[in-house]
């Protein structure tokens, strides 16, 4: 899976978290592991321009998604086996997201992770124009974000246990096990 990030926003953000959550969503949604995704972080003026140009709405927004390949659930019957594809571009505006994060009472990192999940779901064909769609998309978004955080906690716990085991093994002198 290839995910490229270009930060043109002028703000420092954790690229590794954005890549991690995007990879988690794409894998969780059973997208081909060789799929490609591009993420661009922009300033408010650039986002306002994109928002007007593509959505005919004034002012900046938090996230916009630009799908590349047409994805359909189950694919077309006459299509070859599914393969890698360019999912598209997610454009994030960290300065706009920072204001939202402050209003919501959580960190910018959390807001950007949430927006990345949201953007990925849009690339995969989800929308929230109708109440039923909104319920489905936001429910899935919240579940994926919670699952990603749980995955991070589990990985940290395993790393902590491995480090503890290394410390204990170093103190006892056992490297290959007690039988050696």
Image: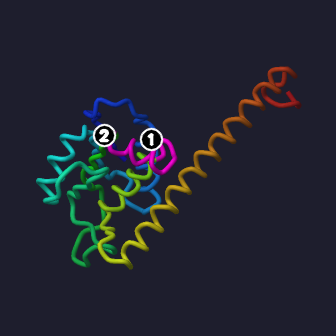
Residue 146, numbered label:
none
Disc 2, SS: strand
Identify the magenta region. 95-110
The image position of residue 74, as x and y in percent, is 33, 75
Residue under the point 45% across and 41% down: 108
Q: Is disc 1 surrounded by few (<14), some (14 to 19) or many (20+) residues within 10 Å?
A: many
- For label 2, the residue is 4
The image position of residue 170, as x and y in percent, is 80, 21
**What secondary structure prevails in the magenta region?**
helix
- For label 1, the residue is 108
The image position of residue 12, as x and y in percent, is 38, 30
* Of the image marks 2 and 1, the number of the one nearer the N terminus: 2
* Residue 153 vs residue 103, the one in the foreground: 103
Whole-angstrom CA distance, mark 2 to mark 1, is 20 Å
Residue under the point 16% across and 60% down: 55
Figure disc tally: 2
Q: Is residue 105 magenta?
A: yes
Give left or right: position of 119 versus 151. Answer: left
Q: Nearer the viewer, mark 2 or mark 1?
A: 1
Disc 1, SS: helix
């Amino acid at each position: 899976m290839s995910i490229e990030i270009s930060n043109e926003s002028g703000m420092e953000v954790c690229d590794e978290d954005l890549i991690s959550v995007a990879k988690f969503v794409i894998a969780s949604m059973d997208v081909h592991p060789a799929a490609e995704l591009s993420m661009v972080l922009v300033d408010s003026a650039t986002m306002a321009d994109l928002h007007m140009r593509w959505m005919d709405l004034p002012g900046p927004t938090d996230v916009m998604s630009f799908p590349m390949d047409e994805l359909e659930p189950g694919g077309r019957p006459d299509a070859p086996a599914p393969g890698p594809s360019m999912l598209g571009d997610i454009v994030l505006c960290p300065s706009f997201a920072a204001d939202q994060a402050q209003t919501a009472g959580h960190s910018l990192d959390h807001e950007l992770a949430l927006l990345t999940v949201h953007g990925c779901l849009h690339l995969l064909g989800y929308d929230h124009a109708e109440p039923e769609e909104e319920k489905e998309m936001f429910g899935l978004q919240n579940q994926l974000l919670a699952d990603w955080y749980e995955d991070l906690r589990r990985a940290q716990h395993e790393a902590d246990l491995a480090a503890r085991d290394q410390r204990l093994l170093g103190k006892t002198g056992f490297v290959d096990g007690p039988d050696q």
